[in-house]
Image (cartoon, rainbow, N blue to C red):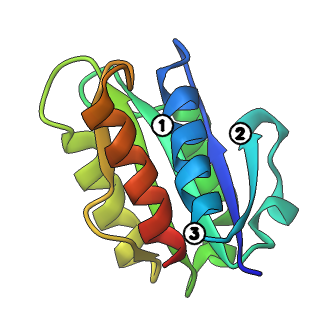
Amino acid sequence: MAKLNIIYYTGTGNTEQIATYIEEGAKSAGAEVEVIAVDSADESSLDADFIALGSPATGAEEVAPEMVDFVDSVKDKLKGKTIGLFGSNDWGTGEFLETWKEELEDAGVKVVGEGLVINLAPDDDDKIEAAKAYGKEIVG
């Protein structure tokens, strides 16, 4: 059985909610899933077939510093892995996720699709289904 570890940072709870829907989608596709808050994550958190990383947009469309610090500390272990990227934003276009994706791909990481950006909370069927579908896509 494929294993997905979802590592995230949340400020208001929105990114954490997205993580739970990604988890549901991946489980429905037959994966074993563990959801880990970034402050509890370490190198061993990358011991999975697939990884998903989540962050809210902060400041001027930037990945949260907590996620940047974690990813920088494990970037070598991410090389060659297939990962999903997701996050929540309040305004803007989701540029923070595009930039994050480019940085990771430049470091030799394979990112699934374009990633998933949800404005504010995943509080309607479209947003919830998008998160579940991305969970399936990551482990697909």
Q: Name the residue under label 2.
A: 38
x and y percent of residue 121 in the render? Answer: 38, 19
Q: Residues within 10 Å of mark 1 (few under 14, many from 20)?
A: many
Q: Which mark is residue 132?
A: none
Q: Residue 55 carries which label?
A: 1
Q: Quadrant of residue 96?
A: top left
Q: Distance between the residues labelled 2 and 3?
A: 24 Å
Name the residue at 36% across, 30% down: 88
Name the residue at 40% across, 58% down: 134
Circle nearer the N terminus (2, 3): 3
Q: Which of 47 and 39 is in front in this view?
A: 47
Looking at the rendered image, the disc whose residue lies closer to the viewer, 3 or 1, is: 3
Q: Looking at this rendering, what residue extends furthest in the left direction?
A: 93
Please indicate whether residue 80 sits to the left or right of residue 99 in the image.
right
Q: Mark 3 points at which residue?
A: 29
Please indicate whether residue 62 sits to the left or right of residue 3 in the image.
left
Q: Is 128 located above or below residue 44 in the figure?
A: above
SS for dot 2? helix
Q: In which quarter of the image is residue 59?
A: top left
x and y percent of residue 82 in the render? Answer: 52, 78
x and y percent of residue 112 in the render? Answer: 38, 71
Circle nearer the N terminus (3, 1): 3
Q: Which of 74 and 22 is in front in this view?
A: 22
Identity, as a three-letter code, of the amino acid under mark 1: Ser
Q: Looking at this rendering, what residue extends furthest in the bottom direction?
A: 80
Q: Quadrant of residue 73?
A: bottom right
Q: Residues within 10 Å of mark 3 (few under 14, many from 20)?
A: some
Q: How far apart are marks 3 and 1 (CA)?
A: 24 Å
Name the residue at 54% across, 16% down: 11
